[in-house]
Image: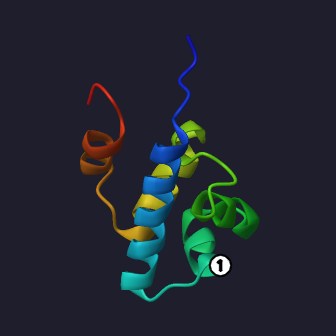
Amino acid sequence: MRFKPTKEQDKEIADALRAQRDIKGLTQFQVAQRAGVCPQLYGRFECCGRSFLTARFKTVTGVLDALGINATEFAKKYVEGC
């Protein structure tokens, strides 16, 4: 069975990514560069145009690292069963 996050989960994560980016004083472009993803993809994560929870592992960990978010704590908060 394929994992399908809810719109509420996507919105909550998008808001958390945006808030952390703002705290760090970074632009979407800077986060994307640090994460090794294209700026359009990162922008879609923040506007719920693309679910962060269904992105590739390398993409997710790159974004979390770029924002200084602990991956284990993120998983405990946003991924069921962690």
Q: Residue furthest top?
A: 1
Location of residue 36 (image quadrant): bottom right
Q: Can you give x and y, in whole percent of width and height, for residue 2 in the image?
A: 58, 17
Q: Can you give x and y, in whole percent of width and height, for residue 67 in the image?
A: 41, 69
Q: Which residue is labeled 1 in the image?
A: 29
Three-letter amino acid code of the residue under disc 1: Phe
Query: Which residue is rendered at x = 55% and y = 43% of the image?
Result: 7
Q: Can you give x and y, in whole percent of width and height, for residue 81 in the image?
A: 28, 25
2, above or below 79, in the image: above
> Crowdedness of circle 1 by 10 Å Cα count: few (<14), some, many (20+)?
some
Label 1 sits on a secondary structure element that is: helix
Query: Which residue is rendered at x = 46% and y = 65% of the image?
Result: 15
75, above or below 16, in the image: above
Q: Is residue 81 left or right of residue 42?
A: left
Image coloring type: rainbow
Question: In which quadrant of the rendered image does the C terminus lie?
Answer: top left
**Count of marks overlaid on the render:** 1
Q: Can you give x and y, in whole percent of width and height, for residue 51 in the image?
A: 60, 45
Please tell me which residue lies in front, 50 or 66.
50
